[in-house]
Image: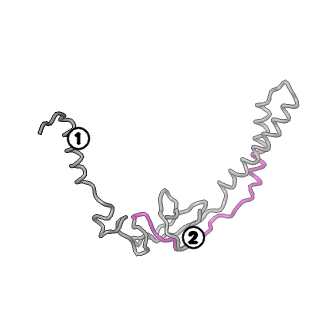
Amino acid sequence: MNIRNPLLICVAAASIALAGCATSPGYGNNGYYGGSTSSYGQASCYDCGTVTRIEQVGQPTSGVTGAVLGGLVGAAAGREIADDKSKGRRNTATAAGAVAGAVAGNVIEKNVRGPRYNVYVRMDDGRVVTVTQNDLNGVREGSYVRVQNGRATLR
């Protein structure tokens, strides 16, 4: 047998060696992919648990104060940015700034002073964790969640 390309031999040997390292997803977990499961039927993790209670802490706001203040700031900014040569452009810029500022102020106030929720979670290891967040995003009592960065999110 005449072997002419040593690089080809090295590649073939490496391929055979690496093929021996490959495993099927089921090996090592009794034939189940994904590892062990908790008593809730979900894949277990350190920061997961079940929501036991949800309390609303803050009251929702109308956003009127934010809209008024935002409108004033927007009108002043629009007037400053407008070209001084044309009174019509200046008035249009002032009105547009007031509308944009009112919308932005309304949204900001609702995000800052909107309702907040205390979410109580019984973790898989028995601990009870409480997180406070602005929105629930579908989380309800009995939901299986992950607690990360001070928030409970559906798992």
Question: Residue flagged by tag 2: what amino acid is it?
Answer: Arg
Instruction: Find out whether residue 62 is within the magenta segment.
Output: yes
Task: Tell me if 113 is positioned left or right of 80 in this view.
Answer: left
Q: Which residues are magenta?
A: 45-70
Q: Amino acid at mark 1?
A: Val
Q: Secondary structure at mark 1?
A: helix
| Extreme residue in the right direction | 88
User: Camera-side residue: 43 or 150?
Assistant: 43
Residue 103 image offset from top left, x and y in percent: 75, 48
| Callout 2 crowding tier (Cα within 10 Å): few <14, some 14–19, many ≥20 | some
Up/down of 95 relative to 146, above or below: above
Helix, strand or loop under label 2: loop
- Residue sitting at 61 percent across and 61 percent down? 135
The reply to whether dot 1 and dot 2 touch (C-beta < 8 Å) is: no
Reading the image, the residue beneath label 2 is 140
Looking at the image, residue 74 lies above or below residue 65: above
From the image, tell me which residue sits under label 1: 11
Q: Residue 28 location in percent, x, y?
A: 28, 65
Give the CA distance from mark 1 to mark 2: 55 Å
Q: Residues within 10 Å of mark 1 (few under 14, many from 20)?
A: few
Sequence order check, earlier mark of 1 and 2: 1
Viewer-nearest residue: 27 or 146: 27
Nearer mark to the viewer, of 1 and 2: 1
